[in-house]
Image: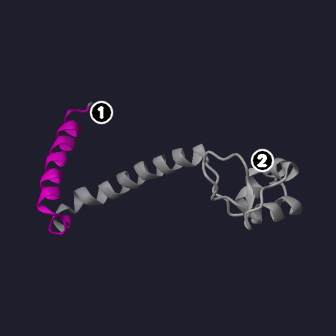
Amino acid sequence: MPAATPRPHVMALLFDTDFKRPADSLIFRHLDGRLFTEEEQAIVRKATIEELQAAGVHVHNPEAGADAAAAATTLVELLLKYAVKHHETLAPLMTDEDLIEYDRLATVVAAGAQAAPE
């Protein structure tokens, strides 16, 4: 299903909305400080995610958090392949504390890999 085209009257109102209102406030204001009318409040509250994003408003997206977590895990796995193979290159870049922790963790990982059944 194609994304809906943002409605011009909604976009105009969103561009004139002060989104830096207190978190506990349910009342929106114009950029010049005027309170929204009841009609304007209803329009903003019914704005679609696409309209909010088109206006540059940050919209909390729970799925984005899951995607970011999965990407972080994949990134770590990718980097780990190179870090283990090129330990001698990384060691001079590490602090003494990090090098000790790296060696400790690498020993734990290696022991787990040897013990894991295939």
Magenta stretch in the rendered image: 90-116
Q: Quadrant of residue 19?
A: bottom right
Name the one closer to the observer, 89 or 13. 13
The residue located at (31%, 55%) in the rendering is 81
> Residue type at mark 1?
Glu
**40 in the magenta segment:** no
Q: Position of residue 32 (x, y in %)?
A: 74, 68
Residue 118 tag number: 1
Extreme top residue here? 117
Q: Alpha carbon of mark 2 to alpha carbon of mark 1: how far?
A: 55 Å
Q: Is residue 34 above or below residue 71?
A: below
Q: How many marks?
A: 2
Q: Which residue is mark 2?
A: 45
Q: Is residue 7 visible?
A: no
Q: Is residue 91 visible?
A: yes
Callout 2–callout 1 Cβ contact below 8 Å: no
Name the one closer to the observer, 8 or 113. 8
Quadrant in which the C terminus is drawn: top left
The residue located at (84%, 53%) in the rendering is 37
**101 in the magenta segment:** yes
